[in-house]
Image: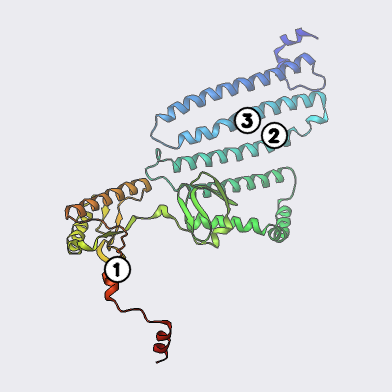
Amino acid sequence: MNWEALLNWKLLLQWPGPETQTIIWLTQVFVVVFCTVSLNFLMMRILDILTVLGEKTASKWDDVLIEALRLPLRLVTWVIGLSVAAEMLYDVSESALFEHVGMVRRVAFIAIIAMFFNRLITGVEHNLTDPGRMKKPMDTTTAAAVSKLLRVSVIITSLLIILQALGYSVSGVLAFGGIGGMAVAFAAKDLLANFFGGMMIYMDKPFKVGEWVRSPDRTIEGTVEHIGWRLTRIRTFDQRPLYIPNSLFTTIVLENPSRMFNRRINEKIGIRYNDWRKMPAIVADVRQMLIDHDDIETDARTLIVNFDTYGASHIEFFIYTFTKTTNWVRFHGIKQDVLMKIMEIVEQHGAEFAFPTRTLHMVSDDDQQDSPPAPTTEEARHAHRG
C-alpha cells in the first residue's frame, strides 16, 4: 500500500473512481464517517445548550420544537454521511449492493420528516394538556383524538410520497383503494363500527379519561383509563381492567357521576310514638341546622325536612338535601356530621329514637271465667246455617 500518496492532499479532495488508489479512497471514507460522528456530537451539544436556554424563556413551544428535532437531526446527519460514503464505495467498486443508495436516501429523508412531525404533534399534545404549562389545559380526550388523526394523516401522506418516490403511481394506488374499499368495509364492519363509536365518544364527549362512569344496562362501572379507536379501557373499583368495544357505547345508557353538581342525602329517621308532640320542634331544628351547615347546599338545591309517615313502632320524619361537594369520601364525612347533629337535636328535645317493639296482651284466669263458653261444633254449624 502506497502510504506516500496520502501526502498529496489534492488526491484526497478528488472524488474516488475505479482507478483511485486503495489508501486514498479508504482515507476519504474514513474522513466522511469521522466528520459525520463529529458533526453529530457537535449538533447534540448545541441542542443541549438550546434546551437550557429554552427552559429560561417564557415561551412554551421552543422546548417542544427542540425535543422534536433532536432525533431527526441525528438521523439526517447519519443518513447524509453514510450515503456519501456508500456512493464513494459504489464509484470505486461498482458493486450492485450500492446501486440504490440515492433511492434509499430519499425514502429515509421522507421517513425522518414524518418522524419529526409525529414527535412535534406529540409534544404539542402534551403541552396543551399539561396544567403546569397551560392556564386552561385542553381536554385530554379531545387532544388525544386530534393528535391521533394528525399522526395518521402524516403517516398516510408520507407512505404515498414514498410510493411516488419509488416509482409507483399514486393515482393507481388510490383507485385500487376506492375499488377495494367496499370489500374491506364489509369484511371489517365490526372494526369500523368500533372506529365510528370512538369518533362519537370524541365528538359527543359523554366521558373522558379519568372520569367515573357506569351503565344501568350493563355491569359496567369504573374509572376511564384510555379511549382508543377500537376499545375503551375502564378500571373497575376492585382494580380489574374492563375492555369495552366502542360500538357498545352507541347502544347503551351511560351515566357519568363525575359530572354531578352535588351529592344527595336522603334519610328517614324514626322516633317513638310517645314523642309525637316534640316532632314539630325537632323537624324545625333539623331544618335550621341544615340551612346553617357550611357544607350543605340550600340556595340552589331542594331542602325538605318533614314528618313523613306512621311506622309499625315509630313515627318518621325525613331529610332530603344536597352537599356542596361531589367527592365520595368528603360526602360521607359530611353525612356523618349531619346524622350526628340530628341525634343531638333529638336528645336535646328529650325524645328517643324508636326501635321495633311488640305489645303482648296476656289473658288471666279471671278473664277466661267471665268470658262466655265457646260454642260447640253443632251449635256453630246451626248458627252458620241460620
Q: Secondary structure at mark 2?
A: helix
Label 2–label 1 contact, CB within 8 A: no
- For disc 1, the neighbor class at 10 Å (few under 14, some 14 to 19, many from 20) is few
Camera-near label (3 vs 2) is 3
**248 to the left or right of 58:** right
Quadrant containing the C terminus is bottom left
**Would you name the residue on which mark 1 appears?**
363
Q: Which residue is mark 2?
A: 105
The residue tagged 3 is 75
Res. 306 image quadrant: bottom left
174 horizontally vs 327: left or right = right
Give the residue displayed 66% in from the left and 59% down from the top: 189
Q: Is residue 165 above or below residue 70?
A: below
Instruction: Give percent across and percent down for residue 365.
Output: 29, 68
Q: Amino acid at mark 3?
A: Leu
The quadrant in which residue 304 appears is bottom left
Q: Nearer the viewer, residue 253 or 267?
A: 267
Which of the pair 242/310 is nearer the observer? Answer: 310
First along the sequence among labels 1 and 3: 3
Looking at the image, is mark 3 or mark 2 earlier in the sequence?
3
Q: Report the Cα–Cα distance between label 3 and label 2.
A: 11 Å
N-term mark: 2 or 1: 2
Pointer 3 local density, CA inside 10 Å: few below 14, some 14–19, many at least 20: some
SS assignment at label 3: helix
What is the quadrant of the N terminus in the image?
top right
Mark 2 belongs to which amino acid? Arg
